[in-house]
Image (cartoon, rainbow, N blue to C red):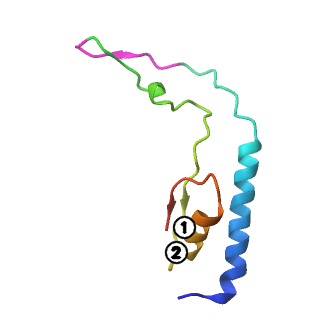
Amino acid sequence: FYNPPQVVNRDLSVLCLRTFLELRAAAPPPPARAAKRPRLEEDPAGKQEDPAGKEEGREFGAKKKPAVLDALSASGLRAIRYVKEIPRLGDVVA
């Protein structure tokens, strides 16, 4: 199941993803949009709901840990290397 000629391919893939994440971390956050803010909806009990989910800490421009989908993986070796070798990585699905 282990294909030795693909080692270089996996090395380059890990290097590219690691470099992308380093550049992404160093980039300034995007400017806030000047869009309309959705109104808070009131339910019959009198509580207000925030449809944008701001109370949960999800703000526009906040950087989340990126998820990786290795859709064409056969053995999952590349996904295993992603998890072991790349810091600041979210979910990896193989």
- The residue at which mark 1 appears reads as 70
Residue 20, image quadrant: bottom right
Tell whether 83 sits left or right of 51. Answer: right
Please name the residue shown 63% across and 20% down the image: 34
Dot 2, how many residues are within 10 Å of its Cα: few (below 14), some (14-19), or many (20+)?
Answer: some
Dot 1, how many residues are within 10 Å of its Cα: few (below 14), some (14-19), or many (20+)?
Answer: some
Residue 89, image quadrant: bottom right
Please name the residue shown 23% across and 14% down the image: 44
Rendered position, 4 above or below 33: below
- Is label 2 in a helix, a strand or a loop? loop
Find residue 5 and report its horizontal and vertical position in percent: 69, 88
Find residue 12 and report its horizontal and vertical position in percent: 73, 71
Does the image show residue 52?
no
Find residue 3 and report its horizontal and vertical position in percent: 61, 88
Q: Amino acid at mark 1?
A: Asp
Outermost top residue? 46
Please name the residue shown 64% across and 56% down the image: 87
Tell whether 22 sits left or right of 45. Answer: right
Residue 63, image quadrant: top right
Residue 44 inside the magenta-drawn segment: yes
- The residue at which mark 2 appears reads as 76
Task: Look at the numbered discs 2 and 1 and tell me whether their residues touch, using CB distance below 8 Å.
Answer: yes
Magenta stretch, main secondary structure, is loop
Rendered position, 4 above or below 68: below
Rendered position, 74 above or below 33: below
Q: Which residues are magenta?
A: 37-45
Q: Amino acid at mark 2?
A: Gly
